[in-house]
Image: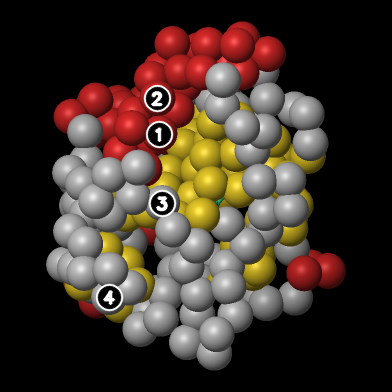
Amino acid sequence: KINILRSGMVLLKGYISSDDQVNIVKTCRDLGIREGGFYQPGYQDGAKLHLKMMCLGRNWDPQSSGYIDTRPIDNSKPPEIPEFFHDMVKRALQDSNAHIQKNKGKIIPFMLPDICIVNFYTKTGKLGLHQDKDESRESLNEGLPVVSFSVGETAEFLYGNDRDVEKAERVNLESGDVLIFGGESRHVFHGVPCIFPDTAPKSLLEATNMLPGRLNLTFRKY
Ligand code: MD3
Ligand code: FE
């Protein structure tokens, strides 16, 4: 089920198969305990983000709000983005554009990601309203999309034209959902106010033994 939420913003509901969800969890777990794996990042002012993070392909550093090859906290290099992640991103963009074209909308530019930011939210995980503006000028100007995969517990997701939470639209992101932000929607404010406990698919928990929580992968081009 594909929904165009606004120009450039597409939600592919239940898009990732159960097998692929299991595969994503196992892959992130495996990469997460290697060099460049999960850590709890902090901002410049010392505040910690309410989640665990790792970057694949390149590092994004919340301290400096910049893209860098080695991570300052431990001088680690990021793991590569696995090939099957690339395949899934490509397919999601193609399927979205096919749907957009049928509905006479504006095509989302194609993007080959060079960075994947993996966030893991436990039950107290959250992310305040923000814009993603640290990608390159070219990427932002051309409205190259961010592609996000949600796996595990359901998140409440807010987005809107300004920082005001009251005016924001909300949508739930469930396990298996893919959300794409490109073109005119690339600059929207967005955030995750909360995670709904005990909402992960039972089969996923049984197949992976993952901790209760939510994995979110965002693919971008710097
Ligand atoms: C809209 N992550 O990593 S995914 C982030 O659920 C981030 O972990 C959220 O915001 C999460 O920066 C939301 C959907 C998303 C990701 C990136 C975007 C929406 C976006 C970039 C620009 C506009
Ligand atoms: Fe973001």
Q: Is residue 102 above or below residue 197?
A: above
Query: How many callouts does the rendering have?
Result: 4
Please tell me how crowded label 3 is: few (under 14), some (14-19), or many (20+) other residues with Cα within 10 Å.
many
Residue type, mark 2 in image: Lys
Q: Is residue 198 above or below residue 131?
A: above
Please give the residue where the numbered disc 3 appears in the rendered image: 38
From mark 4 to mark 1, how far is it between C-alphas? Answer: 22 Å
Query: Residue shown at 28%/68% (left/top)?
Result: 74
Which circle's residue, 2 or 3, is located before the other in the chain?
2
Q: Which image quadrant for residue 66? A: bottom left
Color scheme of the displayed model? secondary structure
Q: What percent of the width, then of the height, locates residue 23?
A: 38, 20
From mark 2 to mark 3, how far is it between C-alphas? Answer: 14 Å
Specify whether residue 203 is in view: yes
Residue type, mark 4 in image: Pro
Q: Which image quadrant for residue 60? A: bottom left
